[in-house]
Image (cartoon, coloured by chain):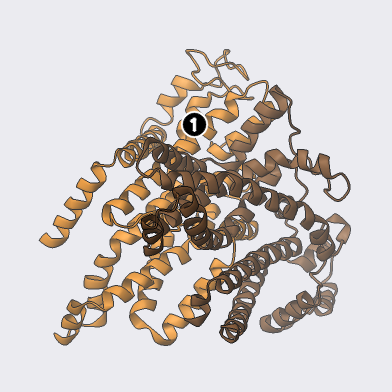
Chain colours: A orange, B brown
């Protein structure tokens, strides 16, 4: 990393830190990630011991369905007597896992396609951008439902579907930054010095496209998490007994009056997590480019 | 200007055709890779190899993929979307036609709700830039896009339908048959779908109004001593509506996605519920047809907004 780019990141961080909402978003995001990581460690290292003994034990005679919130079960228990807090913690793991993987897939494929289109121009650009136009002709969630319908209902397929439908967003950004970067003088200089196209794309164009792609990734995390929750809510995502927030809201909806916490708690978790990523994305965008804000993002 | 506009309309319509063709290809290819052999499914496991081959030929499934696509596409163009694998084998086109009104009614109502919230909120936020009000509206808008709509729907049902009992929890009533009851029943679903959309439009309205508050026109009007309210309504709002309408159109896909989920919450008999059922029952022709129709609506709304925009703002078509 050059000094110039290190300085830029330092300045961005300073800008970001000065925005209290962005910092609040970051706190939420970090908390959810830590909670999700905790659930992951729990099932790998402690063999589901910690959370299980703390919150859920099928052999326990006190395994009572639809208990109201209490000290033992801060958010009550569900229709099978499982602790809602423990399941919400596990849900965090799933949400983050889906969000990160899907966005990483989309970002990798999308930005490569976009940068290629912007840098190569001509027929390559035309072919890629027509494909992007077609993809953008579908409402994202509807296309994801179509893909899941064919692949089958599972967590993995939800990740594939979402990774696929968010490709165009990254391709667009990759292309526009690649075009603007390609016009810079240092690219001409690099070319004059005889560097290969691969070298120029990976060493010059890509690093300079990182920040807009990062903003987009953060905002799309918010979307991917809502989309995963929506698919799970519709019963098209991970299979029970896997705890996902969307599916928890759905199964709680049968007991809306009797045990409202069943739906309220996981829904609140989705809301806060998504809000966190939105705040971070907005803060990052403003920090990177304080002049412009509130562009279209969906 | 008239001429430029007509030319622009033609170009835009022509540009839409390859997109629609591409969409149909994507839908066709995705469904083509669906697991399970429709012929074997239909005949059952006892079917002989000959039976299978015969039916395969009868359905044209022995043809190369592109021929199958072209035949499928020509069927679509004639309004033949194939038959549902469930639902008593009814034509998919009939199913879609019977569900479309409910979805359109919900979408239009949601659009109304979101505009009614977004325009005042966005203008207020822009006029009172960097005050507590602006801050509040911004946080509210960000919360609006962050709320999962199915959850918001459930909360509204719990509070307003079950506990307070002031509104029905969805259940579509045809507006053509009982208009008043239809409106009553659409309120909660429309708020649920409209909230996130309102949040998007609020942000757009705010930035559009801010841009237009800072123009020579407005400075001139101010220096002429026009009342601030008059400046706002005559100069700023009119100009700000264009970008807001555009965003409303571009984001319409977001609204269509939202209805698909929210229809589930409110047992709303629209396209969303149709596609949900079809997906659950692996009724691929219905999934195919519904996804295609939803994408088609989305592209057409975009086209319409684009044309409206260029009609209202001649600079676009001249460019």
Residue identified by numbered label 1: A88
Q: Chain of mark 1?
A: A
Asked if A214 appears above or below A255 in the picture, the reply is below
- From this viewpoint, is residue B61 visible? no
Q: Residues within 10 Å of mark 1 (few under 14, many from 20)?
A: many
**Which is nearer the eye, B14 or B315?**
B315
Where is residue B294, by image quadrant?
bottom right
Asked if B74 appears above or below A10 in the picture, the reply is below
Q: Does residue A17 appear left or right of residue B216 in this picture?
A: left
Tell me the residue at 56%/85% (across/down).
Answer: B4
The quadrant in which the N terminus of chain A is found is: bottom left
Q: Position of residue B241 (x, y in %)?
A: 53, 59
- From this viewpoint, is residue B106 visible? yes
Where is residue B178, by image quadrant?
top right
Q: Position of residue A208 (x, y in %)?
A: 25, 66
Tell me the residue at 84%/76% (across/down).
Answer: B50
Tell me the residue at 17%/51% (across/down).
Answer: A10
Q: In the structure shown, which secondary structural element does the residue marked by tag 1 occupy?
A: helix
Asked if A249 appears above or below A54 in the picture, the reply is below
**Which is nearer the eye, B252 or A25?**
B252
Q: Does residue B8 appear left or right of residue B69 in this picture?
A: left
Q: Position of residue B249 (x, y in %)?
A: 58, 62
Q: Position of residue B173 (x, y in %)?
A: 83, 44
């Amino acid at each position: 990393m050059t000094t110039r780019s290190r300085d830029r990141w330092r300045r961005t961080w300073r800008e970001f830190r000065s925005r209290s909402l962005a910092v609040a978003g970051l706190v939420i995001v970090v908390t959810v990630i830590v909670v999700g990581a905790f659930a992951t460690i729990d099932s790998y290292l402690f063999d589901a011991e910690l959370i299980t003994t703390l919150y859920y034990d099928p052999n326990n005679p006190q395994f009572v369905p639809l208990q109201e919130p209490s000290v033992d079960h801060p958010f009550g228990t569900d229709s099978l007597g499982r602790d809602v807090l423990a399941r919400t913690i596990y849900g965090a793991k799933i949400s983050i896992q889906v969000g990160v993987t899907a966005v990483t897939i989309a970002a990798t494929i999308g930005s490569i396609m976009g940068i290629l289109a912007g840098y190569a121009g001509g027929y390559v650009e035309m072919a890629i951008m027509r494909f992007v136009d077609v993809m953008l002709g579908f409402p994202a969630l509807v296309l994801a439902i179509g893909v899941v319908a064919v692949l089958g209902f599972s967590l993995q397929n939800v990740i594939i579907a979402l990774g696929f439908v968010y490709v165009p967003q990254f391709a667009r950004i990759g292309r526009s930054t690649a075009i603007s970067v390609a016009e810079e003088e240092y690219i001409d200089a690099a070319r004059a010095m005889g560097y290969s196209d691969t070298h120029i794309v990976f060493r010059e164009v890509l690093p300079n496209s990182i920040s807009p792609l990062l903003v987009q990734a953060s905002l799309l995390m918010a979307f991917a998490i809502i989309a995963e929750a929506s698919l799970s809510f519709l019963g098209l995502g991970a299979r029970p007994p896997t705890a996902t927030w969307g599916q928890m809201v759905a199964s709680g909806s049968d007991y809306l009056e009797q045990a409202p916490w069943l739906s309220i708690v996981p829904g609140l978790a989705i809301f806060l997590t998504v809000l966190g990523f939105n705040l971070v994305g907005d803060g990052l965008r403003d920090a990177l480019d304080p002049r412009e804000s509130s562009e279209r993002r969906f | 200007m008239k001429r430029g506009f007509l030319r622009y309309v033609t170009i835009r319509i022509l540009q839409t055709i390859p997109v629609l063709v591409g969409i149909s290809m994507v839908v066709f290819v995705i469904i083509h890779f669906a697991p399970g052999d429709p012929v074997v499914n239909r005949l059952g496991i006892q079917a002989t190899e000959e039976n299978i081959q015969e039916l395969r030929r009868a359905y044209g499934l022995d043809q190369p993929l592109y021929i199958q696509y072209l035949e499928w596409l020509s069927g679509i163009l004639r309004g033949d979307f194939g038959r549902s694998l469930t639902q008593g084998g009814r034509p998919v086109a009939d199913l879609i036609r019977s569900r479309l009104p409910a979805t359109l009614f919900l979408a239009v109502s949601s659009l109304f709700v979101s505009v009614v919230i977004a325009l005042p909120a966005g203008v207020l936020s822009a006029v009172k830039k960097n005050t507590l009000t602006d801050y509040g509206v911004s946080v509210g808008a960000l919360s609006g896009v962050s709320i999962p709509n199915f959850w918001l729907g459930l909360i509204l049902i719990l509070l307003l339908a079950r506990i307070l009992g002031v509104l029905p929890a969805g259940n579509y009533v045809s507006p053509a048959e009982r208009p008043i009851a239809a409106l009553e029943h659409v309120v909660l679903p429309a708020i649920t779908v409209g909230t996130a959309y309102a949040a998007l439009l609020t942000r757009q309205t705010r930035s559009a109004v801010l841009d237009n508050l800072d123009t020579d026109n407005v400075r001139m009007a101010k220096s002429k001593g026009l009342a601030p309210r008059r400046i706002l309504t005559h100069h700023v709002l009119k100009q700000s509506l264009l970008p807001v309408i555009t965003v409303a159109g571009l984001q319409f896909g977001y609204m269509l996605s939202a209805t698909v989920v929210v229809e589930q919450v409110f047992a709303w008999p629209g396209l969303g519920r149709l596609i949900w059922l079809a997906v659950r029952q692996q009724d691929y022709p219905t999934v195919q047809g519904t996804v295609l129709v939803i994408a088609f609506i989305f592209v057409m709304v975009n086209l319409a907004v684009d044309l409206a925009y260029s009609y209202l703002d001649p600079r676009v078509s001249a460019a």
